[in-house]
Structures are given as structure tokens and as C-alpha cells.
Image: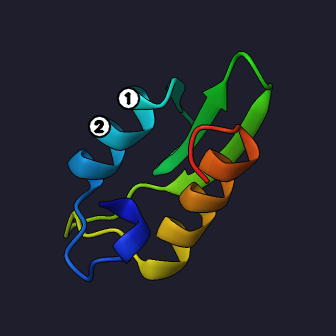
Amino acid sequence: MILSLLKDFSWGELLSVMQKHNFELYSGSGSGRKFFHAKTQTVFFLHEPHPEKIVKRYALKIAITALKNAGEIK
């Protein structure tokens, strides 16, 4: 689960969690990605990790905060 801040949480797993909780993904320039929650207008930005696909802890914390702000998790 995203709340456990796993050290090996992959980009694909993050995308799956965000989509499950009603966030849409928009590609930006380069590796920049924007997530948008239509109901609450919550927006946040992350960089897609590369070449490894493991999400950094700070990025997971940003995603968790956005999920909380959108009312998707407590």
C-alpha cells in the first residue's frame, strides 16, 4: 500500500493507485507528469523516475498528501 512508503514502489504501482482513486494522468514536458482529480480540482506534479522506475519517498509523500486532500484516503 502506498501509505507504507515502500522503498521499491514502482511507477506502474503509483499509476494504478492514483487511477483507482480517480486521479487522471497528464504528460508534461520531459519526465514531468501532472495528476488531476476532477471532483475536487486537486492537482499535483511529479517527475516520472528514469531509467529505474522506482518512485522516490518524497514523491510518494506528495501523492499521499494529494490523496488525502482529495478525500480519497484518511
> Label for residue 20?
1
> Label for residue 16?
2
Q: Is residue 27 above or below residue 24?
A: below
Q: Amino acid at mark 2?
A: Ser
Q: Is residue 67 above or below residue 40?
A: below
Q: Is residue 68 above or below residue 54?
A: above
Residue in the image at 19% along x and 70% along y: 52
Q: Amino acid at mark 1?
A: Lys
In this rendering, position of residue 29 left or right of residue 56: right
Locate residue 66, reporting x and y percent.
67, 50
Residue in the image at 38% along x and 29% along y: 20
Q: Is residue 24 above or below residue 74?
A: above
Residue in the image at 38% along x and 76% along y: 5
Q: Quadrant of residue 43?
A: top right
In this rendering, position of residue 56 left or right of residue 39: left
Q: Quadrant of the C terminus?
A: bottom right
In this rendering, position of residue 29 left or right of residue 66: left
Residue furthest right as drawn: 41
Q: Residues within 10 Å of mark 2 (few under 14, many from 20)?
A: few
Q: Do labels 1 and 2 touch, CB within 8 Å?
A: yes
Alpha carbons under labels 1 and 2: distance apart: 6 Å
Locate residue 12, reporting x and y percent.
22, 46
